Image (spheres, rainbow, N blue to C red):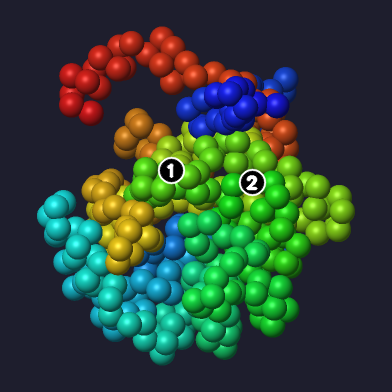
Amino acid sequence: MGMWVGRGRKARRSYGFDDIALVPGRLTVNPNEVDISWELKGKRYEIPFLAAAMDGVVDTRMAVEMGRLGGIGVLNLEGVQTRYEDPSGILVEIASASKEEATRIIQGIYKRPIKEELIAERIKEIKAGGAPAVVSAIPTRACKFAHIAQEAGADVFVVQSTVLTVTHITTEYEVADLHKLCREINMPVIAGNCVTYDVALDLMETGIDAVLVGVGPGAACTTRGVLGIGVPQVTATCDVAYARDFFFKKTSKYVPIITDGGMSVGGDICKAFACGADAVMIGSAFARAEEAPGRGHHWGMATPHANLPRGTRIQVGTTGTLEQILFGPAELDDGSQNLVGALRTAMGNCGARNIREMQMTELIIAPAIKTEGKVFQKFQNVGMGK
């Protein structure tokens, strides 16, 4: 397996969304009659979309709106929402910073210590809005924050880092024990991020209820450039899906996988499901919503790192309401609106009546899929400065 890249060294070829295409099915289904719901530890959600735990994407208002629309908004428990009682002015400061000063300003803003009492307050605000309270923390704070969140009534807890493994070697701080965390709290636990079969299997064996897939593909993430690590999302999703199916055969426990990052348009999202995803977590596409707290800006979770930022602030603009981005009607022709409609239509054309059947869709390697016959589109876009 793999190709020679030098004497004695092989590398496996991997694929991203632009490298593949979906093959239409032998039968087709009315898009209005496909089932796109997914299940997390016995609870069913109407749409398989999660808004990423990033400060430019989700605040309590956005989480409530995502819940109203049938999805999930994940609140970052280590961002401005838990460092500042009223973060609105802080968000304006981040959005209005110049490109040259943005990272430095963000680093300074995130030096403010986390106020643990705000964790419970934010969760209660989301619950009061009638939405599921789904919150996220990095591994070093996960155990402590999970107990605070559970007491406040949270519905799901997410343990998330750039790269998450069950075994972590350090003498500087306490390592998160996922086995213990899953035993001690009653709410579902989502953990990640990972990109390989072995690590996904290790994570599933701790007792978690879903796995996040993706290292560095996000629009505001610079991990791949700064550290040189990552696996393109098609290959990563396929490998982790294989781990999920093996684990199910072994234990009879189905652990959903959530492809996280690298999807800005409907076509990428449809491909993620065909590769094996049960749900997707999205940042930049939702950062463009009118309800998003970033005011048309989006920045990575690792941007505030004091010494080695692995994220950047980008301007994505505001293009419509969250409902319009999810359900249309689409006013843009770039695939960034009516994401649910895109998924339903692709499933119908591939003959998939539900997400599980969509995961069986035939894939082909087709790097020409976005350029073949599109010479006039390309010419017009260049001419318009797009």
Q: Amino acid at mark 2?
A: Thr
Badge 2 crowding class, 10 Å Cα cut-off, few under 14, some 14 to 19, many 20 or more, is many
Residue beneath label 1, please? 228
Mark in front: 2 vs 1: 1
Q: Secondary structure at mark 2?
A: loop
The residue under the point 24% across, 48% down is 315
Left or right: where does residue 206 sit relative to residue 115?
right
Q: Which is nearer the eye, 351 or 100?
A: 100
Q: Earlier in the sequence, mark 2 or mark 1?
A: 2
Left or right: where does residue 56 sit relative to residue 230?
left
Q: Secondary structure at mark 1?
A: loop
Left or right: where does residue 33 sit relative to residue 222?
right
Q: Which is nearer the eye, 308 or 258?
A: 308
**Of all residues shown, which one is farthest toward the front?**
7
Q: Position of residue 333 (x, y in %)?
A: 35, 30
The residue under the point 58% across, 23% down is 7
Q: Can residue 5 be seen here?
A: yes
The residue under the point 64% across, 46% down is 196
The residue under the point 29% across, 84% down is 85
Q: Position of residue 376 (x, y in %)?
A: 30, 12
Could you tell me how far apart the alpha carbons at marks 2 and 1 are, in whole angstroms? 16 Å
Residue beneath label 2, please? 196
Badge 1 crowding class, 10 Å Cα cut-off, few under 14, some 14 to 19, many 20 or more, is few
Task: Determine the image quadrant of residue 90.
Answer: bottom left
Task: Determine the image quadrant of residue 167.
Answer: bottom right
Task: Determine the image quadrant of residue 270.
Answer: top right
Quick one: quadrant of the N terminus? Answer: top right
